[in-house]
Amino acid sequence: MSNESLLARRERFLGAGAPLFYSKPLHIVRGEGAYLFDIDGKRYIDMYNNVPCVGHANPNVVEAMARQQGTLNVHSRYLHAGIVDFAERLTQLHGPQIESVVFSCSGTEANEVALQMARIATGKRGIVCSNGTYHGNSEAVAKLSGGRRAQPASPEVRSFPFPELYRPVVTNLSEADLTEAYLQRVRDAIAALQNSDEGFAGLIVCSIFANEGLPDVPRGFMPRAAEIVHAAGGVVISDEVQSGYCRTGRWWGYEVTGFTPDIVVTGKPMGNGLPLSATAASKSLVDQFRAKTRYFNTFASSPLQAAVGMAVLDVIERDGLRENSATVGAALKAALLERKTRCAAIGDVRGQGLFVGVEMVKDRDTKAPDAARAFDMANRLKDRGFLTSNAGVFGNVLKIRPPLVFSPADAREFLAAFDATIAEMNG
Ligand SMILES: Cc1ncc(COP(=O)(O)O)c(C=O)c1O
């Protein structure tokens, strides 16, 4: 079947508008490690997908999945040691304030749980978030969305401008004063909720502001913001769905921006493709949530989730993937920063570990975003065998976020393709 007829059937049976990447969609049939293969056998280096963090079709994960599915897979209302062991192991990856876990199946669900935890603990409903964020697609969680996915204003949500050095909310300030300017926006958002019927329950952020475009965050912003939230009686939720699991070269994004969350939300990479997410917090927060909701989620907290989740952690630790993310990512970022000195269309290069954003601009002085160029680059790189995308609030950031098994040799191949693409587009 040709790609054209598959596309037509897709529209017929999935509905028109189901999103696809690239101007000519890619038809992939197999994955292995950091590589994907299309229907014609062409190999692509996957530089986009964070879900298969330990590599596509990782044999350890496949084996754990098959073994558990062939032994027992059932819902969570029976005793089973596997999920308790997995929860205990997850809590040990955080500081002592994180003691217990609620499992679910998607980042959206885990964020819903986090919002409910904050609201139950405080007796208030109002949530503060950034103006360019995305935390999920359910009706409650989508109320937080900003940027290109912004929803109608909700009385329960107040946003603050996401903190960044590149296009600061106030220009010509020292970094310390800029931090203070952003913090004032957070205070204002909290005060607006406190002065409304909603009250203030907490702050939710992606700890590295990934959907906002991976900005360099003014120093000291997050630890001070967390203090302000606590002083106002709220809880701090760190959405680690993108930033967690060694993506930044550290286990958690909150280590990069330097704060201590009360609630940690994880998802995407946890199951290497098996739907698995978690909301982790103090025993007190989790106990209050359980008592009030008697939360049950059919496919969550299962022996299968536990076996696969454990296998993913085993591979990350055994194969030193946190260290790989830190070292390969740092070298890649340095190489891209060097390209910035000779390509005027690159306005900025940002990121940590194996999560790098290359901001494309029409003009370095005005910083006018160039989404068309970023999209064009992603398409040209795809044709050369490298999968990226364009992201950020303006859609002008080339997003590089490969599986954690991405190697120095893969990075070298990518940089050659990047150079050729830039040359072809006349710098
Ligand atoms: C930061 C962040 N949180 C939550 C989600 C939602 O996760 P899911 O699609 O698994 O519901 C996403 C998805 O892209 C995300 O980027």
Image: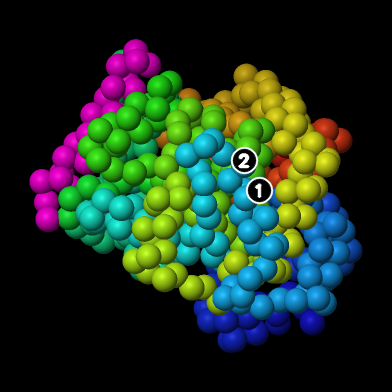
Image point 53% across, 55% down: which residue? 101
Image point 85% across, 57% down: which residue? 60
Magenta-colored stretch includes residue 407: no
Q: Is residue 378 left or right of residue 199?
A: right
Tell me the CA gap for discs 2 and 1: 7 Å
Image point 78% across, 48% down: which residue? 314
Q: Is residue 364 above or below residue 418?
A: above
Q: Is residue 202 left or right of residue 352?
A: left
Image point 52% across, 78% down: which residue? 16
Residue 421 location (% of width, % of height): 72, 39
Residue 202 or residue 356, whichever sits in front: 202
Residue 32 found in image quarter: bottom right
Label 2 sits on what residue type? Leu
Does residue 392 appear in this view?
A: no
| Magenta range | 174-197
Badge number at residue 89: 1
Residue 53 location (% of width, % of height): 72, 50
Residue linked to disc 2: 93
Residue 3 found in image quarter: bottom right
Residue 407 or residue 305, whichever sits in front: 305
Magenta-colored stretch includes residue 177: yes
Label 1 sits on what residue type? Arg
Residue 325 location (% of width, % of height): 72, 35
